[in-house]
Amino acid sequence: MNESPLHDAWSAVRDCGSIAYIAILFAIVGVVVGPVAITAGIISKGRAGLYLGLVATALGALCFMAGGGGVVLGRSKTDQALAGVGVDPTMVERIRVEGYREAAQCVSVGGATGTLPLFFGVIAIVVTSIRQRKAHHDS
C-alpha cells in the first residue's frame, strides 16, 4: 500500500526529531517575512524589501543548516547508544543502519522547510534591487 506524501512528510519529521521542529519554526517565520519583503520591495522607496529579503533568505538557510545539524546530532546519538553497555553485538549493525536512516531524514526536512523562505527572500532582494536601479536611473 502506498503511503500519502503527507504521511511521508510526517514520518520524516518524526524520525528527525526536535531539530525538525526548529526548522519548521524558521520556515513559518520565513514564509511570513518573505511575501512581506517582496511587497516592501515593490512599494517601498527605501531598502525595507532588501533587509526583509535578507532575513527571509537567512531563515531559509537556517532551515537547511538545521537539517545538516540534525544528521550530525542523530548519528552522534546513535553512536553513543551503540557504545553503551548491554547492546547485543548481533544487533549493532541493524541499529546503526536504522539510526543513520532516521538521522538522514533531517536533510529532507531541512530542504523542504528551507526552500520557500529562501525563494521568497531571493525574489525580494532581486525586486528591490531592480526597483532601486530603475529609480536611480530615472532621477
Image: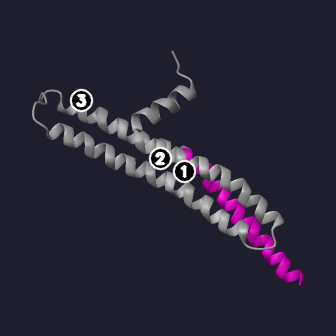
The image shows residue 111, relative to residue 53, as above or below, that is above
Residue 98 x/y as whole percent: 30, 32
Residue 26 x/y as whole percent: 54, 51
Callout 3–callout 1 Cβ contact below 8 Å: no
Q: Say which residue label 3 marks.
A: 94
Q: Say which residue label 2 marks.
A: 22
C-alpha span from label 3 to label 1:
33 Å
Task: Name which residue lies at 41% across and 41% down.
Answer: 18
Please name whichever residue, 94 or 114, is drawn nearer the observer in this view of the structure. 114
Amino acid, disc 1: Phe
Please name whichever residue, 41 or 106, is drawn nearer the observer in this view of the structure. 41
Amino acid, disc 3: Arg
What secondary structure is the magenta-colored segment mainly?
A: helix
- Total marks placed: 3
Dot 2: element: helix
Q: Nearer the viewer, mark 3 or mark 2?
A: 2
Dot 3: element: helix
Callout 2–callout 1 Cβ contact below 8 Å: yes
Farthest residue in the top direction?
A: 1
Please name whichever residue, 26 or 115, is drawn nearer the observer in this view of the structure. 26
Farthest residue in the bottom direction?
A: 139
In the image, the segment drawn in magenta is 113-139
